Image (tube, rainbow, N blue to C red):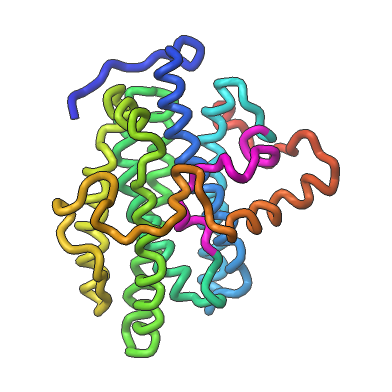
Amino acid sequence: MAAAKQLPGPQDLSDDEREALEALLFSLADDEFVIAERYTEWQVRAPTIESDISVANIAQDELGHARLYYDLLEDFGYEEPDLIWERDASEWRHSTLCELPFDEGDWADYVVRSFLFDEAEYIRLQALEGSSYPRLADRIEKILAEETYHREHARSWLERLCEDDESRARMQDAVDRLMPHALTLFAPTDEDIEARIDDLGIRTENLLTMREEWLDEVVPRLESVGLHVEEAQLPEQYDVHHADFDLPDELGRDQSHTDAWFDLYDEFTKSYRELGRHEAAKIMKDPDDE
C-alpha cells in the first residue's frame, strides 16, 4: 500500500477523513472493551493462581487500550457516556468473538479465544504503527508491547492444554465453536469506509491482507499442537467478504449482535443506570496527560 500524506489534527479533518477515523476507532475500542468485560468473568475462576493474576492483568490492559482509542474519539466531541454507558447496545461495532459467553466456564474456551484475538490484534496493531493519523500512531507502541505479552500467555496455554487427548478434545471443541466468530474480526464495517481507511493511510494493510497474514499464523500453530481448522484452507482462496467461510449470522462489525451481547451490555451498564448517573467517574488518567 502506497504511503499516504499525514492527516491533520482532529479539528482540521474533512468530513470523509473524520468518518473513516471514527469507524476504525470504534471497532478497535469496542473490541478491546467488550473482550475485557468477558475476561473479567475468569478472575478467581482460572485453574491456577498465576493464571488468575494473568487474566486480571490482561483484562486491565485491554480496558486501558480501549481508553486510548475512546480518548481519540473524544477529540470529535464525544464524552465518555456517549461512547460507553449511554450508547445504545445496537450501535456497538465489536466482533462477535468478543461478546460470546464462555462455554460452561471452560478454560479451553478462554485460551482459544484469547489466542485467536491476540494474534489478530497484533497484526492489526502493526498496520497502525505507520498510520497517517499521528495521534493514533503515537499510541500504538504502548499497546503493541502489552499485546506481545498477551500473545505469549495464550500461546503457552495453547501448547499446555494440547498435551493430552482429553484436554485437546476440549480445545478442538472451542476452535470449532469460535473460529467462525474470530473471522468477523476482519469483517468490514462498511465497504466504502474501509476502502477510505486504506486510501487515507490510516492503516497500512487492508482487511484481506491482514486476514491472510492471520490465517498464515494461526492455522499452522493450531495444527502443530494437534488441532485442525476445517474452514481455513489457503488464505488466497477467500475474498474480503469471507464468501467461502460459514460465518455466523451476526457479525458485530455491521452492528448485528447475538443475544448474549445485549445481556452483557445490560450487566455492565446496570450500576450506571441504577445510580442515575449522567457522567462517568474517571478511573484512568487522560492519555495525553501521561
Which residue sits at x=21%, y=74%? 224
Residue 287 on the magenta segment: no
Left or right: 103 in relation to 179: right
Which residue sits at x=40%, y=56%? 117
Which residue sits at x=32%, y=84%? 163
State the quadrant of the C terminus: top right
Which residue sits at x=74%, y=38%? 281
Q: Quadrant of residue 86?
A: top right
Q: Quadrant of residue 76?
A: top right
Q: Position of residue 112 (x, y in %)?
A: 39, 68
Q: Quadrant of residue 278?
A: top right
Q: In this view of the protein, can residue 65 be seen by the observer? A: no
Q: Position of residue 266 (x, y in %)?
A: 70, 53
Q: Please tell me whether residue 85 is drawn above or below residue 176 in the rendered image.
A: above
Q: What residue range appears in magenta?
A: 82-100
Frontmost residue, 180 versus 280: 180
State the quadrant of the N terminus: top left
